[in-house]
């Protein structure tokens, strides 16, 4: 059966879901049907679309990571575009004026610190508060739906890059909506429009669909497999490859010996991956314009590759080899380390700083993963 997204199912019978309803749509360029027609265009054809809402990177996907998104009028549709990544991240009563039903269609990356998850969470909270129905058009998890990795975030580290779920959670965006709505006791009027033709054991999604980058630095499905591990590098003085053609696939810094680092990492025999020495010069972000030496991660077996463990072992190894390595300090006194917000704990940073192995932590996390699997089981649609 060919892969059909939630938007495909929705648009074959829109009156079943939103007859005579004025619609607000949370989306970006990744919101397309199986023929790559924009969800904005599909819903505008109904004559019911009245407002757009932009997550991080904006409705048109042109804004870099962390940059605030403005509220404006979309030049193509002439619809108002309300920012959900500016002064406010949650739809307000004013933003929702004139909207009968909210529709959510964003491609997720299958990873806890990808902010679209919390745009969804906040939309659920607004839906519950204002009793405006929310319809989530489901999309594939590019990492598949079988494997759960990493710890459940400690609540004290909750932020817009993390709530108490595992780093790699193995659910689709629609399944996450059901999980949030029930386990977090939001109780919004929620409908999830499912896909057809997607399997939890699909680790080669590019064979079934054309990948539209959901954000500027997730250009291909290959990137999504390394991202849950190498995104931790954002909290260090290493480059995670922003400003190159291989964001999150290359990691390095001016002070690293690429050949030696690759040899040490490959000696760890981490499953499903090989490290190749490489040199790159970021055009923006950390070490802009400087020659960085490091490694490119080549995932050889997506089924056995442990993305979270690999990323943390990479950082642990660099910290052991190079005294120049450092975790970025918080910009203001009293704030959390960004690395801790990403890992959802301060234990990883503490162990690395004290030169103690992370292996015991990985074993502890297995119980948390089993707990989440049991909690999430009722919300699996496929």
Image (spheres, rainbow, N blue to C red):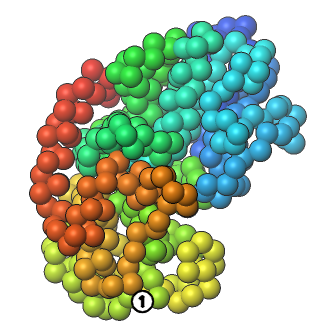
Residue 85 left/right relative to 234: right
Which image quadrant: the N terminus? top left
- Say above or below: 281 vs 71: below
Query: Residue visible at 43% across and 80% down?
Result: 252
Residue 5 is at least partly visible in this image: no
Residue 337 is at least partly visible in this image: yes
Q: To which quarter of the image does residue 87 belong?
A: top right
Query: Residue visible at 16% across and 80% down?
Result: 267
Query: Residue visible at 61% across and 54% down?
Result: 66
- Residue 31, horizontal then vertical, whole percent: 61, 39
- Say above or below: 359 vs 344: below
Residue 147 left/right relative to 179: left
Q: To which quarter of the image does residue 55 belong?
A: top right
- Residue 273, horizontal then vertical, whole percent: 26, 70
Q: To which quarter of the image does residue 337 belong?
A: bottom left
Which of the two residues, 140 or 239, is positioned nearer the viewer here? 239
Check disc 1 and report the residue beneath it.
255
Which of the two residues, 173 or 289, is positioned nearer the viewer here? 289
- Residue 300, horizontal then vertical, whole percent: 27, 68
């Amino acid at each position: 059966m060919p892969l059909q997204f939630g938007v495909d199912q929705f648009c074959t019978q829109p009156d079943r879901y939103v007859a005579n309803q004025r619609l607000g749509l949370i989306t970006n360029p990744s919101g397309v049907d199986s023929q790559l027609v924009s969800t904005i265009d599909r819903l505008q054809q109904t004559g019911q679309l009245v407002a757009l809402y932009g997550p991080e990177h904006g409705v048109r996907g042109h804004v870099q990571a962390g940059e605030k998104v403005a509220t404006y009028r979309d030049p193509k549709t002439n619809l108002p575009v309300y920012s959900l990544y500016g002064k406010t991240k949650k739809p307000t009563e004013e933003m929702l004026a004139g909207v009968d039903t909210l529709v959510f269609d964003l491609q997720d990356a299958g990873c806890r610190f990808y902010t679209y998850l919390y745009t969804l969470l906040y939309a659920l909270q607004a839906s519950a508060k204002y009793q405006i129905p929310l319809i989530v058009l489901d999309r594939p998890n590019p990492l598949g739906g079988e494997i759960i990795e990493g710890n459940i975030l400690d609540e004290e580290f909750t932020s817009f890059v993390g709530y108490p779920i595992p780093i790699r959670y193995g659910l689709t965006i629609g399944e996450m909506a059901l999980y949030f709505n029930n386990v977090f006791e939001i109780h919004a009027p929620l409908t999830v429009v499912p896909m057809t033709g997607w399997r939890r054991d699909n680790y080669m999604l590019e064979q079934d669909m054309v990948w539209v980058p959901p954000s500027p630095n997730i250009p291909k499905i290959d990137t999504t497999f390394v991202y849950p591990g190498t995104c931790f590098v954002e909290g260090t003085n290493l480059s995670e490859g922003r400003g190159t053609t291989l964001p999150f696939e290359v990691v390095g810094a001016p002070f690293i010996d690429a050949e030696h680092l690759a040899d040490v990492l490959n000696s760890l025999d981490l499953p499903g991956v090989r490290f190749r020495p490489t040199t790159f010069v970021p055009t923006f972000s950390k070490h802009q314009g400087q020659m960085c030496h490091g490694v490119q991660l080549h995932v050889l077996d997506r089924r056995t590759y442990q993305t979270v463990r690999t990323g943390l072992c990479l950082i642990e190894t660099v910290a052991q080899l190079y005294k120049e390595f450092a975790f970025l300090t918080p910009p203001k006194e009293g704030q959390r380390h960004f690395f801790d917000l990403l890992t959802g704990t301060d234990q990883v940073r503490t162990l690395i700083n004290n030169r103690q192995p992370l292996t015991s932590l990985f074993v502890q996390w297995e119980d948390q993963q089993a707990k989440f699997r049991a909690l999430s089981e009722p919300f699996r649609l496929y």
